[in-house]
């Protein structure tokens, strides 16, 4: 059966289950599927009053709230392209996203209006509105004055983009990954099947809404299965534990699980109503998997995904959940291993190489960057993930490292190139190298080795302070070490491996 188009998820659910609860916020706010239908309709009408039409971009840097979800749902229903922006991004970063995505409308936090409106105007964005939590902001006001029905465009093509999600890359410049309606529809259907979502499920949502983990894997799966959502403003271990009894499913990054494990009250009783804990975005240590099983009786289900390909593989609901493995490809998706040097496809089991993906989950390309898009695909149309892995005899994928130069901190991707460019621009810095080493809370800690120009006097704190004005705080190195020179190989390439080895205990307590 063809999966339902994202534009129809809400209409379908509201028709079949009008009274069912879609969302409960920790503030007490509750939306049934009927209210979701009506309220998102008002947001769609409001966007249309600002001239937004199907295919146009709606950029949003807003705090997580029921209203933010309504805005996303409105975009899905009217065929507009949602462009979420991380709330941690600095004005310099937001400036780039707005200029690059050229949205019809930018939606900002009320408190950011004064600082960001001038740059949004300079980027020639026709409309700027605000959206706060708890119903504040000019867009929410406009929605309240708008009707619940809006003119529906003729059914959008399945290949039309539904969202553009920015992801940095090894070149240092962020690129917008265009995710189509078919990407969203087929991935939600595959996850419902694999994770056995039904209308009786309630997902405890503590992830941010500006990445595909919290937006697509979480919200879309709930919408497409007409299940429920308990929405927390952000991850806080104690708050999550408090709300677990209202939920049946949890999705998180490994840092969520290690922080939950630090709470003495996490035990079998606290998770009595839960049927499934899912982890992704970064490697889950086998030790975390074991400890969680011991404390709660639940084997965390690990899955693997990427902005450009949504969810790719997953351990099963029924059947072996193998610690250290990300499971098998989701229905309709194929994964293969290619030799990292030659690109030749490896057919033998357990051979390590670059993982490549093919299927209806793979994105339509980078926004306005056909060259970059071409470079990420093989000649026979497989997407090159840049992750190193092997496939075992049972078909389970194991990620063993990364071919791409990337640090994953608390589930956020940090591309060293972007951080190095900012470090190198600081007067007094000769050169720098950014790398990740084990961090007890974030999995990997973003770290920098810096060579100063002769005579320059800069402290670690000073450098970190400068970077904080340029980059989102999670990208800023937690530690900067000064070195006389960077380790290089015979052809002059910086040896990050040597830096990782030399500084692997940087975050270990003595
Ligand atoms: C916050 N900080 C961080 C991070 N998050 N530093 C390094 N890495 C991080 N991930 C910094 C803040 O800048 C701040 O610094 C301090 O830590 C505390 O900030 P706070 O806002 O309180 O953060 P937190 O609540 O401690 O957040 C940690 C977190 C959060 C809960 C782990 O980062 C998170 O929700 N991560 C999930 C990311 C995610 O959704 N990834 C999915 C990407 P200071 O105090 O110095 O100012 S999508 C993906 O990867 C693919 C598709 C996939 O497979 O899912
Ligand atoms: P992003 O670019 O934010 O979409 O992050 C995608 C990357 O996160 C992947 O290419 C992997 O490197 C990493 N990732 C996602 N899930 C897992 C996982 N379960 N284990 C290891 N790495 C993962």
Image (cartoon, rainbow, N blue to C red):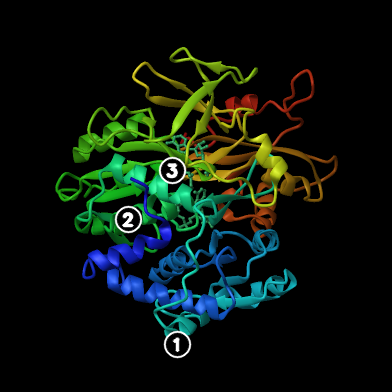
For residue 399, side relative to residue 386 (left or right): left
- Residue located 59% across and 32% down the image: 381
Which of these two is toward me, 235 or 280?
280
For marks 3 and 2 on the same chain, the one whose residue lies earlier in the sequence: 2
Q: Nearer the viewer, mark 3 or mark 2?
A: 2
Residue 384 position within the rendered picture, expressed as x and y whole percent measured from the top left: 58, 32
For marks 1 and 3 on the same chain, the one whose residue lies earlier in the sequence: 1
**Disc assigned to residue 222:** 2
- Residue located 46% across and 63% down the image: 76
C-alpha distance separating marks 3 and 2 = 29 Å
Q: For the residue carrying disc 2, how many other residues have a C-alpha within 10 Å: few (<14), some (14-19), or many (20+)?
A: many
Check contact, mark 3 vs mark 2: CB within 8 A: no
Q: How many marks?
A: 3
What kind of element bears circle 3?
loop
- What residue is pinned by disc 3? 441
Q: Is residue 176 above or below residue 278?
A: below
CB at disc 2 and ligand 1 closer than 8 Å: no
What kind of element bears circle 1?
loop
Image-quadrant location for residue 382: top right
Q: Is residue 132 visible?
A: no
- Residue located 65% across and 52% down the image: 367
Q: Quadrant of the N terminus?
A: top left
Residue 47 position within the rendered picture, expressed as x and y whole percent measured from the top left: 53, 75
What kind of element bears circle 2?
helix
- What residue is pinned by disc 1? 145
For residue 308, side relative to residue 318 (left or right): right
C-alpha distance separating marks 1 and 2 = 28 Å
Which of these two is toward me, 330 or 468?
330
Q: Is residue 135 visible?
A: yes
């Amino acid at each position: 059966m063809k999966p339902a188009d994202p534009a129809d998820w809400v209409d379908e659910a509201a028709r079949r289950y009008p009274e069912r609860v879609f969302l409960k916020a920790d503030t007490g706010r509750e939306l049934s599927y009927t209210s979701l239908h009506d309220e998102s309709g008002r947001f769609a009408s409001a966007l249309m009053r600002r001239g937004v039409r199907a295919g146009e971009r709606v950029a949003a840097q807003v705090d997580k709230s029921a209203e933010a979800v309504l805005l996303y749902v409105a975009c899905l229903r009217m065929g507009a392209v949602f462009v979420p922006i991380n709330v941690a991004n600095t004005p310099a970063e937001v400036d780039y996203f707005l200029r690059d995505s050229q949205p019809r409308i930018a939606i900002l936090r009320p408190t950011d209006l004064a600082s960001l409106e001038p740059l949004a105007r300079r980027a020639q964005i026709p409309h700027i509105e605000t959206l706060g939590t708890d119903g504040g902001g000019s867009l929410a006001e406009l929605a309240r004055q708008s009707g619940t029905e809006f003119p529906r465009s003729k059914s959008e093509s399945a290949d039309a983009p539904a969202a553009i999600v920015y992801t940095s890359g090894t070149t240092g410049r962020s690129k917008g990954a265009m995710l189509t309606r078919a990407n969203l529809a087929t991935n939600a259907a595959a996850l419902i099947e694999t994770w056995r979502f039904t209308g009786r499920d309630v997902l405890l949502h503590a992830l941010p809404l500006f990445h595909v983990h919290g937006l697509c894997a979480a919200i879309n799966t709930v919408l497409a299965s007409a299940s429920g959502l308990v929405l927390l403003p952000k991850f806080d271990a104690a708050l999550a534990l408090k709300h677990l009894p209202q939920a049946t499913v949890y999705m998180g990054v490994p840092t969520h699980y290690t922080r939950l494990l630090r709470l003495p009250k996490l035990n079998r009783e606290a998770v009595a109503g839960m049927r499934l804990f899912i982890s992704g975005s970064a490697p889950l240590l086998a030790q975390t998997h074991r400890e969680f099983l011991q404390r709660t009786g639940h084997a965390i289900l690990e899955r693997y995904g990427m902005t450009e390909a949504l969810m790719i593989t997953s351990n099963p609901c029924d059947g072996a959940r193998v610690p250290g493995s990300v499971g098998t490809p989701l229905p309709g998706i194929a994964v293969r291993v290619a030799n990292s040097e030659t690109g030749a496809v490896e057919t033998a089991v357990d051979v390590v190489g670059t993982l490549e993906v093919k299927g209806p989950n793979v994105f339509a390309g980078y926004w306005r960057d056909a060259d970059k898009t071409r470079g990420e695909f093989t000649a026979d149309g497989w997407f090159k993930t840049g992750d190193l892995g092997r496939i075992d005899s049972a078909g389970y994928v194991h990620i063993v490292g990364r071919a791409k130069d990337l640090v994953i901190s608390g589930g956020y991707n940090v591309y060293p190139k972007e951080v190095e460019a900012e470090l190198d621009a600081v007067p007094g810095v000769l050169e720098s190298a950014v790398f990740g080493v084990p961090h007890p809370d974030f999995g990997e800690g973003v770290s920098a080795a810096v060579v100063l120009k002769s005579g320059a006097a800069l402290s670690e704190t000073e450098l970190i302070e400068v970077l904080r004005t340029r980059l989102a705080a999670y990208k800023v190195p937690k530690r900067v070490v000064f070195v006389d020179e960077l380790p290089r190989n015979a052809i002059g390439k910086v040896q990050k491996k040597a830096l990782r080895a030399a500084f692997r205990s940087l975050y270990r307590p003595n």
